[in-house]
Image (spheres, rainbow, N blue to C red):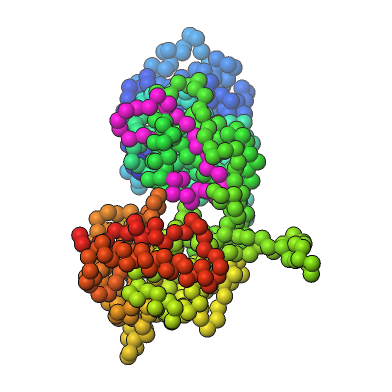
Amino acid sequence: MDLLPKTASTSDINSAEYWESFVKKNSNKTKSKAFEWYGEYPILCSILHKYIRASDKSLIIGCGSCQLSEDLYDVGYHQLTNIDDAESVVKQKTMKNAKKRPELKFEQMDATQMTYEDCSFSVVLDRGSLDARMTEKKEEAEALVEKMFGEIGRVLKVGGRYICITIALENLISKLLSYFSSEGWMVRVHKIDSPNKDDRSESRSPLPVFIVVSTKFKKMAALQSPILELSLSEGSNPERVSSIEDIVKAIRSQQDYAMLQHNLNKRSFCNESVSLDLYAPNNKNPRFTLYIVDKPKGKIPANKFAIFIVPQGRETHYLFGTDKGRGQLANQAGFQRLVVATLHRGHTYQSVDSIKAELSSRVMELGPSDLPSNTQVPFLSIGEDVGDREVMYEGEGSYGNKVIVEDVRGEDGGKYRQIVFSSNKSIVQSQARLVTEKSRSKSGKKRGKGVTRVDHLYLPMDFHRAMTAGLTLLPGCMDVIRTKARVLLIGLGGGGLPMFLYKQFPKFEIDVVELDPMLKDIAKSWFGLIEDERLRIHIQDGLEFIKSSAEKDPPNLYNVVMFDVDSKDFSEGLTAPPKAFLETVVLEAVKRILHPTQGIFILNFACRDDLLKESVISDIQKHFPTLYDSQLEDDINEIVLCLPQRASEGADKRKLQYRDDARALQKYAKSVTSRWESDFDLCEIIDNLQIKDER
């Protein structure tokens, strides 16, 4: 499979201004060396020979000092006329070729004002002339290009071709495609192999080169749609493209990828997020995402470069799904540069070996600059398994955010069902373990294939476990839990946390507030959510629910208020909750609806900005003087536990009491369901609490 690259994110991809400055800089070089990065005849000939016959009367515009017309002449193309508006160039070229190539013509002429008769040529060939013109001021450039295109159309015969060798700046390629397609011409775009493909030096040009072939047809009055075709790899057949925008996007992705390669060869990307997507032909969804991780400065490891293949369903794991985790992975692997490859939904992967075969054509392009060209790059993975992933459901949630329900295999080999949002596919919003139960006959024997259901007594998400452990900090914990406790949970997800609390603590009355009605349907259909008088689902804005509850006289009082809601805006580094949930008016409302002596506020908090994190914690502490923090291992999430009253006892004494309550709570929950997972130790979580009120 010929994978097509598209950059996903990099901190050093330059804007369109970069390309224009690059062209100008190279245009100012001496004529003998100008535009050599377009590629010499051996690079271009495989495509040029498809569209130019030796018998064609051909015109080369803006010939400059390039050797292309001489090379074509030497292989039998003798009906060539070259024009350039510089008199010195024409004289020099004429003198140089007078004896050796007597039929090769050079004339001084401006391509925007040609004196040739209509339909004089079968081919007009342009190597960089259009690029040079498009670096002028925008309005002037467009006017000149319009004139040049008009002249090209005039001097070409019907069936003739305008062949433009270009670096395809966005404004240039858009203009070229729109002009000739609107004239009823067929336009075909070829990407040519880099003339410096094996050159890994810093001087290598980052610019990919394209050949655009526009074939003149008789203009038809009622043209249904433009005739556009695209070929992005050598040897592949051009494929029909529906719009100019699609071609422009495809070209831009190639440019971004080339710039990424160029920058990877020039320097190290320590502590920077660099990634790209690889697409299968004719598929709009990425097949792979490659994350490039460089070892921080210091001792350079002997091993230079490797590829790590992440099994399906594991890409959301901290080690593979976060920049920090991938940095740890690269450090553990001991390579100077590690490329972490994740696999995408909607594709089939036969085996690790087949993935290696697919990626092998691309990985060498991403290696360090000092990597020998004959290096055998090692592929690393977790065993020889590509993992399992089955998408069970996809639908549009609120605000156009796609919700994906999928079944995956976990680290323990078990099956898990999870929810992922299209806005952030690297984060699992909810996860539940699946169990298969077979029915029994009257004699007690198991029979049939069995029924798969969600195990509501198992919490696979570490932050949900930490939130549950926070109940032990509730003043009078066991008295409240054994009698009657009111719980408010903002954020439903798949319903895993409320269902666990519902099953393990039968005296709980739980209100869950969820903005997106689709999530309620998904939680019921795919995660076995129960709704009754003890577990009530409110489809409402969580902020409005809190504020309206606080405005009641007396306010609705809860023993436990939990925030488990993610942010859709990551611009400020805050992943959960949304910033609006941490405003003063909301924190005041939470405190008002919390039981003053037997209440706790539990916040699932994730922030990538350390300064912002410190500021948020400080703001919370103004309203909740006693704070605890449960930092999750290998995770950006942390659980902040907030009490409305100031602690009257020292930290050590409090921790001993919390530990006793944790044991009692765990024992009580087990007595209710006759089950408590052995790896879910409340005491261990309590022991790792950080007390914030004693800073």
Q: Is residue 183 left or right of residue 489?
A: right
Using the image, determine if residue 633 lies above or below residue 119: below
x 57%, y 27%: residue = 48
**Looking at the image, can residue 647 be seen?**
yes
Q: Is residue 422 left or right of residue 297?
A: right
**Could you tell me which quadrant the C terminus lies in?**
bottom left
x 54%, y 48%: residue = 411
Q: Position of residue 255 (x, y in %)?
A: 44, 39
**Could you tell me which quadrant the N terminus lies in?**
top right
Q: Nearer the viewer, residue 75 or 526?
A: 526
Stretch of the chain drawn in magenta: 294-320
Q: Nearer the viewer, residue 156 or 616?
A: 616
**Looking at the image, can residue 68 be seen?**
no
Q: Position of residue 153 (x, y in %)?
A: 53, 40
Q: Is 235 included in the stretch rendered in magenta?
A: no
Q: Nearer the viewer, residue 404 or 191?
A: 404
Q: Is 314 included in the stretch rendered in magenta?
A: yes
Q: Quadrant of residue 295?
A: top left
Using the image, determine if residue 368 lies above or below residue 238: above
Q: Position of residue 368 (x, y in %)?
A: 41, 28
Q: Position of residue 329 (x, y in %)?
A: 43, 39
Going by the picture, which residue comes out furthest to the top? 99
Going by the picture, which residue comes out furthest to the bottom? 553
Using the image, determine if residue 554 lies above or below residue 693: below
Total tally of numbered discs in the picture: 0
x 29%, y 72%: residue = 643
Q: Is residue 561 left or right of residue 627?
A: right
